[in-house]
Amino acid sequence: MLPSTSREIRVLIVSADQSAEFLLRALRLHGALRYRVVGLIAESNAWHATSIAGVPVLGSIEQTSAL
């Protein structure tokens, strides 16, 4: 796991499509929100081992208990 500073809140986004990319861009534009996206959770395994805007897709919704 990546270290966290007291200023940031680490989050996962449950999406790996255009909506995830849109949300990533919005969060990065508004740095004052303090959210740091550490990973994405996809609806299916098709996205596993890829990344969107430099953020890794960690697995599918079915695999979340193993994360």
Image: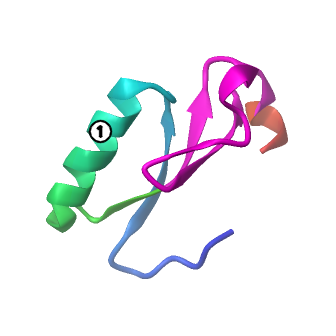
Residue type indicated by callout 1: Leu
Residue shown at the point (79%, 30%) measured from the top left: 63
Question: What colour scheme governs how the chains and residues are painted in the rendered image of this protein?
Answer: rainbow
Relative to 62, residue 26 above or below: below
Q: Position of residue 30 (x, y in %)?
A: 15, 58
Q: Is residue 36 left or right of residue 63?
A: left
Relative to 39, residue 23 above or below: above
Depth order, front residue of 18/62: 18
Q: Is residue 2 left or right of residue 45?
A: left
Q: Is residue 15 left or right of residue 42?
A: left
Depth order, front residue of 11/49: 49
Q: Position of residue 65 (x, y in %)?
A: 79, 34
Residue shown at the point (73%, 33%) measured from the top left: 64
Residue shown at the point (20%, 46%) measured from the top left: 26
Q: Is residue 28 magenta?
A: no
**Dividing the image into 4 quarters, which one contains the C terminus?**
top right
Q: Position of residue 31 (x, y in %)?
A: 20, 65
Which residue position holds label 1?
23
**Dividing the image into 4 quarters, which one contains the N terminus?**
bottom right
Relative to 7, residue 15 above or below: above
Q: Is residue 40 magenta?
A: yes
Relative to 4, residue 57 above or below: above
**SS under mark 1:** helix
Residue shown at the point (51%, 76%) measured from the top left: 4
Q: Is residue 60 left or right of residue 17?
A: right
User: Which stretch did the figure color magenta?
Assistant: 38-63
Question: Furthest residue to the right?
Answer: 66
